[in-house]
């Protein structure tokens, strides 16, 4: 198999393998990644699971205490972001408008400049990740990047067209599990008892890489039911604790800079065997507390750039939500819950921000 280059390099601390020269992989063509199980005209991928009433019934069946948590993270200019991405918000006018009427009403707006689908808590939609092949850039269900674009005056790209995130906006209602990799590694004697997070992996075999066997081990250790079709699977590595909701507002600017620096070095996460295993279970969504949910820069196989992204999203339309505040779930001792969330209907967007709800 040829070396791989991810086209939309929109994942935190991205590890790009090989030389600086252009790379290609014809794996999507050779292995017939299109059409997917959802049909040649499908644009929604795993979001189609929400149309199966049995999946919704199973999701709601795990709600026992009738409580809710939100698990999105703060959006802020000093929060970690990949590369040159950033969140810049200002209040135009102080106030923006008014006073109006006999009641002297005044109001504020905000002006936000950001990569709206790929910042802080973010959902990867169909237009985010592709593979460069000898016949062009291959995206979900065989869409060619150049042909997919929505173009405006002068040929300017105005959106992702048929790959826009709005095609997944029916959303997700799924039985979900959060796998506590920190507790699991401690139980194996591979992580100190006082450790808060897994280490960033550098090479195959490092404990920051979560394999298929690890997923099976955590399911057993946490006494959870097997992963089923339409489920959502979340991974707690502890890496997200560096800017978790329980501490972010208390951090100084210097401490937030330290969190960004750690974010840029890489992250623990799923290895490729874990993603193949979850794909075999026909899950609806992967999620976790890091910027990609792939282990990086070290993985089970070296030389690949966050391979779960291409194997799950581009190949199968199994989407991914990143920078989830899993620590909120762990602190509340919530291991199984109903995940409820839908992407914003951003026509032509590559992804979506959001603040998902966990019912338990």
Image: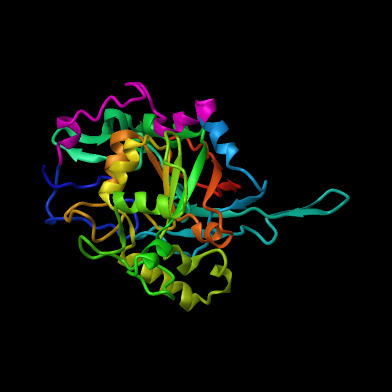
In this view, 348 is above or below 38: below
Q: Of residues 278 and 305, which is closer to you in this image?
A: 278
Q: Of residues 274 and 100, which is closer to you in this image?
A: 274
Quarter of the figure that contains the N terminus: top left
Q: Is residue 321 visible?
A: no
Residue 55 coordinates in the image, percent (x, y): 51, 31
User: Magenta includes 30?
Assistant: yes
Quarter-of-image position of residue 57 = top right
Q: Of residues 353 and 240, which is closer to you in this image?
A: 240
In this view, 187 is above or below 343: below
* Left or right of residue 227, residue 37 in this image: left
Residue 257 coordinates in the image, percent (x, y): 43, 73
Q: Please tell me how many numbered marks the rendered image carries.
A: 0
Q: How is the image coloured?
A: rainbow
Give, as a single range, the part of the protein colored magenta.
25-54
User: Magenta includes 3?
Assistant: no
Residue 237 coordinates in the image, percent (x, y): 40, 61
* Left or right of residue 63, residue 115 in this image: left
Q: Of residues 270 and 4, which is closer to you in this image?
A: 270
- Residue at point 39% right, 61% down? 184
Residue 248 coordinates in the image, percent (x, y): 54, 68
Q: Can residue 35 be seen in this view?
A: yes
View extreme (right): residue: 102
């Amino acid at each position: 198999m040829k070396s791989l280059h991810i086209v939309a390099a929109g994942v935190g601390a991205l590890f790009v393998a090989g030389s600086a020269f252009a790379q290609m992989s014809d794996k999507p063509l050779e292995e017939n990644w299109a059409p997917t199980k959802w049909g040649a005209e499908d644009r929604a991928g795993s979001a189609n699971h929400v149309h199966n009433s049995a999946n919704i019934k199973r999701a709601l069946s795990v709600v026992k205490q009738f409580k809710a948590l939100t698990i999105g993270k703060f959006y802020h200019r000093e929060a970690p972001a990949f590369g040159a991405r950033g969140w810049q918000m200002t209040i135009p006018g102080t106030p923006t408008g008014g006073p109006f009427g006999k009641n002297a009403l005044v109001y504020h707006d905000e002006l936000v400049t950001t990569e709206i689908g790929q910042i802080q808590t973010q959902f990867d939609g169909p237009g985010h990740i592709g593979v460069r092949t000898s016949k062009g850039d291959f995206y979900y269900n065989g869409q060619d990047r150049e042909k997919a674009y929505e173009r405006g005056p002068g040929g300017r790209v105005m959106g992702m067209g048929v790959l826009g995130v709005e095609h997944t906006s029916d959303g997700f209602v799924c039985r979900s599990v959060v796998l506590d990799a920190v507790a699991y590694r401690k139980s194996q004697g591979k992580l100190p008892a006082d450790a808060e997070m897994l280490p960033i992996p550098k090479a195959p075999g490092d404990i920051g890489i979560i394999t298929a066997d690890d997923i099976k081990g955590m399911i057993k250790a946490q006494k959870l039911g097997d992963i089923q079709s339409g489920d959502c699977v979340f991974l707690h590595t502890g890496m997200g604790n560096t800017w978790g909701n329980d501490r972010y507002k208390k951090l100084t600017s210097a401490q937030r800079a330290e969190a960004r620096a750690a974010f840029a070095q890489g992250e623990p996460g799923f290895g490729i065997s874990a993603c193949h295993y979850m794909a075999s279970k026909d899950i609806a969504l992967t999620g976790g507390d890091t910027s990609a949910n792939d282990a990086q820069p070290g993985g089970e196989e070296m030389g690949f750039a966050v391979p779960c992204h291409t194997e799950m999203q581009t190949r199968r339309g199994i989407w991914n939500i990143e920078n989830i505040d899993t620590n909120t779930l762990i602190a509340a001792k919530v291991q199984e819950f109903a995940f409820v969330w839908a992407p914003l209907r951003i026509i032509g967007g590559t992804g979506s921000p959001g603040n998902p709800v966990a019912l338990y």
